[in-house]
Amino acid sequence: MFVLSSIVISQPSADESSMELSDQPTDKMDWWRDARFGMFIHWGLYAVPAGEHMGKRTDRIGEWIMHHLNIPIKEYETYAQQFNPVKFDAQAWVALAKEAGMKYMVITSKHHDGFCLWDSKVTDWDVLDASPFKRDILRELADACERESIRLCFYHSIMDWHHPDAQAINEPNYNSRDPKSVNPNFSRYFQNYLKPQVKELMTGYGDIGVMWFDGEWIPDYTTEMGKELYQEIVDADPDMIINNRVDKGRQGMQGMNKEGEFAGDFGTPEQEIPDQGLAGVDWESCMTMNDTWGFKHFDQNWKSAETLIHNLIDIASKGGNYLLNVGPTGAGEIPEASVKRLADIGTWMKTNGEAIYGTSASPFDKPAWGRYTQKDNLVFVHIFDWPKDGKLTIPDQGMPFQEAQLWTNKGNVKVDLKKNADGWIVSLPAEAPNDIASVVALKK
């Protein structure tokens, strides 16, 4: 039996919780908290049908097409023969993330269909053995990330619709099984397939920042397995950050843990931003630009750059990270609509990024006109709705502000700051320097 390390797994004591910040080494999470903004990439065979199989479109997310259209395994395997993304350019993808102001990248090493984007030693169901592409996608991304100082991270699905010891127990049509049933051989898949693949990812691609698991909700996978996997990973690499989907504690799309003892270093709200943030825990909202994670050629319901930038600010103001998704095409290109929005975000970040990176949650209640972030001796005022009278009131919470600067793409401009009975009054010019969100830095 293969394991990541030969250890004895001990259960956490009653007063331990891996979701509490105090239980994690402070230096382990520091880079991740400072980053605040990352790129999620959902890419695999599902980009080939692009949401449509044999003339039938899925009205659900693109990467679940095998499940939602009930495609038999052998039929789905033909998409591997069509997967030849010759326009894939790892350097261009990483440069795009960097220009957008992103600090890390999470790529689907294997999604629920089981297809691997690297040359796995435990299966031929991978890009080098099953497709005509014959290139290690993760290797190319790892090299590009190292060149550009972007932290590479791996999404990895626990669920596997292709493996007979996992969800493919009833092949050729895996989807006919009772979703509440358990594969009696799943522990063999866990020990001899899932764990070796995790080791390949951790040891073959340089300094990996995060193992981002998913598909943990299946009944085959137990909380004991989750704790075992978590412990073996951190024993092998104490600095590895692991999301809470390694265990069974996630409560729906809210992403945070149910009551109880569960492994994982941060929570994972999906397609939502917690209204009041999540005090005392690390968390990351993963969200799409349109309505799918994996590419669908007919999904053109794109969020505006304004919405995406406001989401980034809102999440940072609540102490969270923003993991923003792109779904590349079967040819290996990131859709132009995504490229344009990332460029717009990057333009905003060039002027205002320091009001996002390394910041902590707002010291004030959420105002109707914008948000706050803070760092060291600065409070950053993010103004979405520019005051028509040129006066912005900041609540007085005993902070001795000394000066205020308005950030513009031409440099910082000192603006008048006075205190009265209502709080601190910032005097602003008639026009906002940025139509989406302008930043005033208040120095204590």
Image: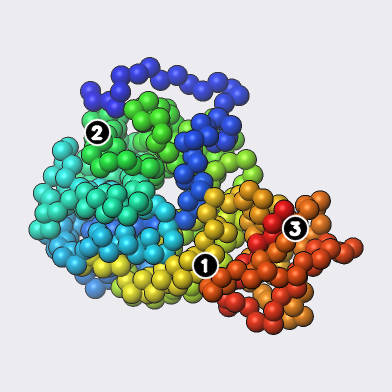
In the shown orientation, is residue 237 left or right of residue 383? left
Q: Which residue is mark 2?
A: 196
In the shown orientation, is residue 27 left or right of residue 430? left
Residue 267, above or below 366: above
Give, as a three-letter code, the residue at label 1.
Answer: Thr
Q: Quadrant of the N terminus?
A: top left
In the shown orientation, is residue 215 left or right of residue 329? right
SS under mark 3: loop
Position in image of residue 7 (x %, y %): 35, 18
Q: Nearer the N terminus, badge 3 or badge 1?
A: 1
Q: Quick one: which residue is furthest to the right in this view?
A: 421
Position in image of residue 287 (x %, y %): 46, 60
In the shown orientation, is residue 403 left or right of residue 334? right
Image depth: mark 3 or mark 2 in front: 3
Give, as a three-letter code, the residue at label 3.
Answer: Gln
Quarter occupied by residue 184: top left
Quarter occupied by residue 89: bottom left
Quarter occupied by residue 185: top left
The reply to whether the C-beta atoms of the residues labelled 3 and 1 are less than 8 Å apart is: no
Q: Estimate how packed mark 1 is, as few (under 14), some (14 to 19) or many (20 or more) residues with alpha carbons within 10 Å.
A: some
SS under mark 2: helix
Q: Is residue 115 visible?
A: no
Q: Residue at x 46, y 44 (%)?
A: 31
Residue 108, above or below 412: above
Give, as a three-letter code, the residue at label 2.
Answer: Pro
Disc on res. 402: 3
Q: Residue at x 79, y 60 (%)?
A: 395
Of residues 214 and 136, which is closer to you in this image? 136
Q: Which residue is mark 1?
A: 351
